[in-house]
Image (spheres, rainbow, N blue to C red):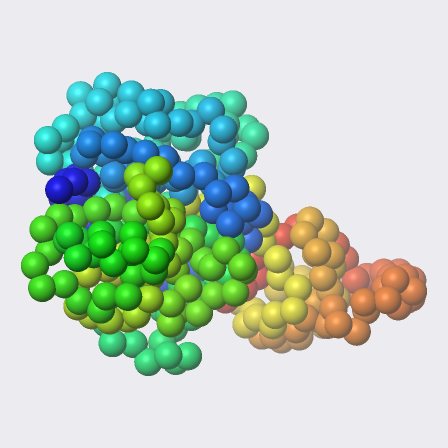
């Protein structure tokens, strides 16, 4: 029996700089497991917590210098020796994720190329109502925008036999869980996602039959304490925020909102989407100016009147009400 090395979630409110419950706008990750298909093999080590986090990281940026031996070196010679991980018992998921984030942000060349990482966590509710629970909607939007995540589960021999047989975990509950394991998770590799059974696990035993498998019955797995509800995401400050197509509530106390009230603003760093700033509304009018000639006419008429300006995505983000 493998003992993957999972001590628990280990979540503390002070562990991370952001909580996804406060996110108004979801950035887009251009790369993930669906695009890069990277998996690793932790072997008999107890290092699943950092293998899962490095799986997420490697797929997010397609980091081809990361391999099994490289991660194991980080595990035994760094995490175990200096950061409290146990070579015999494993580690907490939050500790593994935080270790990988801190390691990445200590590498100036990687930060310069890919942007600095922050970590967000999200705790899925028990017995949610489909299409109504805000946390589930947020989770779905994150996955649809290309973000993989890290979590954990209880397991058993039945769990292993089930997913290794056909690549799908059909179980809804476990009678005798015998181990805990940290895993990376991704949206459906065909690009279509729903919470009924489209969560993909790129597991960390490469070479095992159906190492990449699909989770079905996600709500039952959480309700029955098989799949742990807290998941973690990596965000880069170079992830793209795409505003086009959505309306927002404006923060009327923000000086930018006051400055551009009753004006059009054109986002200059993402899609070039056009918004009408109207009182406490940021109304996307991009659909009316899809044609390049219409855009040129808009600029020609409104820019001289100082009713159209280009602003950065960051400034626009600050205009949105918390």
Residue at 17% over, 67% down: 173
Q: Quadrant of the N terminus?
A: top left
Where in the figure is residue 59, as x and y percent of width and height? Answer: 47, 40
Q: Is residue 87 above or below residue 93?
A: above
Residue at 50% over, 55% down: 189
Q: Is residue 132 left or right of residue 259?
A: left
Viewer can see residue 271: yes
Residue at 33% over, 46% down: 209
Where in the figure is residue 115, as x and y percent of width and height? Answer: 52, 36
Location of residue 194 by image quarter: bottom left
Q: Is residue 7 left or right of residue 185?
A: left
Q: Nearer the viewer, residue 196 or 160?
A: 160
Residue farthest to the front, as pictured? 165
Location of residue 130 by image quarter: bottom left
Residue at 41% over, 30% down: 104
Viewer can see residue 298: no
Q: Is residue 303 above or below residue 76?
A: below
Q: Is residue 290 left or right of residue 146?
A: right
Where in the figure is residue 319, as x and y percent of width and height? Answer: 57, 61
Q: Quadrant of the C terminus?
A: bottom left
Where in the figure is residue 279, as x and y percent of width and height? Answer: 62, 75
Q: Nearer the viewer, residue 107 or 231?
A: 231
Q: Nearer the viewer, residue 168 or 150?
A: 168
Q: Is residue 84 left or right of residue 200?
A: left
């Amino acid at each position: 029996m493998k003992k993957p090395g999972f001590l628990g979630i280990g979540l503390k409110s002070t562990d991370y700089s952001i909580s996804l419950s406060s996110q108004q706008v979801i950035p887009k990750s251009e790369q993930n497991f669906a695009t890069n298909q990277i998996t690793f093999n932790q072997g008999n080590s107890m290092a699943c917590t950092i293998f899962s986090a490095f799986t997420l990281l490697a797929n997010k940026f397609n980091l081809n210098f990361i391999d099994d031996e490289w991660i194991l070196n980080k595990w035994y010679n760094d995490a175990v020796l200096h950061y409290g991980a146990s070579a015999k018992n494993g580690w907490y998921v939050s500790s593994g994720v935080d270790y990988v984030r801190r390691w990445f942000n200590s590498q100036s060349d990687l930060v310069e190329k890919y942007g600095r990482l922050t970590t967000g966590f999200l705790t899925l509710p028990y017995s949610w109502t489909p299409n109504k629970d805000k946390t589930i909607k947020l989770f779905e939007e994150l996955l649809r925008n290309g973000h993989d995540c890290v979590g954990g589960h209880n397991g058993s021999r039945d769990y292993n036999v089930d997913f290794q047989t056909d690549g799908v975990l059909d179980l809804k509950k476990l009678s005798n869980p015998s181990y805990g394991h940290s895993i990376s998770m991704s949206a459906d590799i065909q690009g279509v996602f729903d919470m009924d059974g489209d969560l993909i696990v790129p597991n960390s035993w490469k070479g095992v039959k159906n190492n990449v498998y699909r989770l079905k019955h996600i709500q039952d797995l959480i309700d029955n304490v098989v799949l742990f509800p807290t998941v973690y995401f990596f965000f880069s400050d170079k992830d793209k925020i795409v505003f086009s197509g959505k309306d927002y509530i404006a923060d009327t106390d923000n000086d930018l909102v006051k400055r551009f009230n009753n004006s059009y603003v054109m986002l200059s760093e993402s899609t070039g989407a056009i918004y009408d700033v109207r009182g406490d509304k940021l109304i996307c009018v991009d659909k009316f100016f899809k044609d390049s000639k219409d855009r040129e006419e808009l600029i020609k008429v409104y820019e001289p009147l100082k009713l159209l300006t280009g602003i950065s995505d960051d400034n626009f983000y600050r205009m949105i009400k918390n």
